[in-house]
Amino acid sequence: MKRRGRPPIREITPPQQRTLDAIREFIRKRGFPPTVQELAAILGISPASAYQQLQQLESKGYVRREPRKARSLEVVRVSVPSVPDVVPVPIVGKVSAGPAMLAEENIDGEVLVEANVVGLGRCFALRVQGDSMVKAGIQDGDLVIVRQQPVAESGDIVVALLGDEGTVKRLKISEEGVELHPENPRHRPIRVGPEEDFRIAGKVVAVRRQG
């Protein structure tokens, strides 16, 4: 024996969310719901596709209609955007976005970062000091989220170590050698000599503005 009642609520897809938003906006402006033809015109799709979207929204419990009535459409549930999974990333100190300076690895709290940004790697966060990366959207006081890795590709923004000093710059690798490039014309690139103790601490994967 089948159980009767409302169908279970399930997550809707981005196209279904767009359709639901269009219905709500039409009702807000006009005071009555759109027809299938009007909805199709708003969404730029065929009436058949619009009708299919309505069927899917109805089966998931977001809208309700009366058969054979053109303007019987009613929104009965508003979707809530899903909250992305977040993971804590330790803030381990400061790093220069000016001349190279010591990045002190003293844990100074945590910052929550989306799990899909962190990926499967180990990440840490550093607070930026200086203005040499402003053209890359990294400002003084920002937190850079860094995926710990010993190698990077030319063009990546990295946290590099020259001896015990750390700096955030764009890595440039060419036949002439390795350079750490700023993103501010007021600062000069740092050329890395073959005799220098040069290491890559990690790649910058995200930036968080504080306050």
Image (spheres, rainbow, N blue to C red):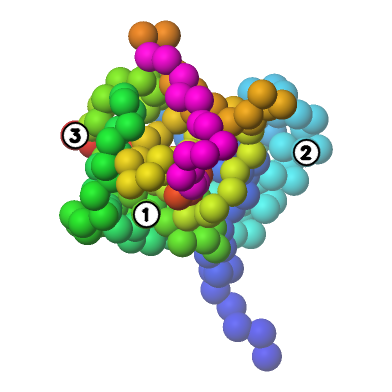
* 195 magenta-colored: yes
Q: Position of residue 131 (x, y in %)?
A: 30, 20
Cβ–Cβ below 8 Å for labels 2 and 1? no
Q: Position of residue 135 (x, y in %)?
A: 43, 17
Image position of 144 (left or right of 177): left
Cβ–Cβ below 8 Å for labels 1 and 3? no
Q: What residue is shown with label 3?
A: 211
- Secondary structure, mark 1, is strand
Q: What residue is shown with label 2?
A: 49
Q: Report the residue at 66% width, 24% height from top.
A: 176
- Secondary structure, mark 2, is helix
Q: Which amino acid does label 3 sit on?
A: Gly
Taking the view exactly as shown, the residue that stands out farthest to the top is 185
Distance in Å between CA atoms under marks 1 and 3: 19 Å
Q: What residue is shown with label 1?
A: 124
User: Toward the viewer: 80 or 87?
Assistant: 87
Q: Can residue 202 be seen in this snapshot?
A: yes
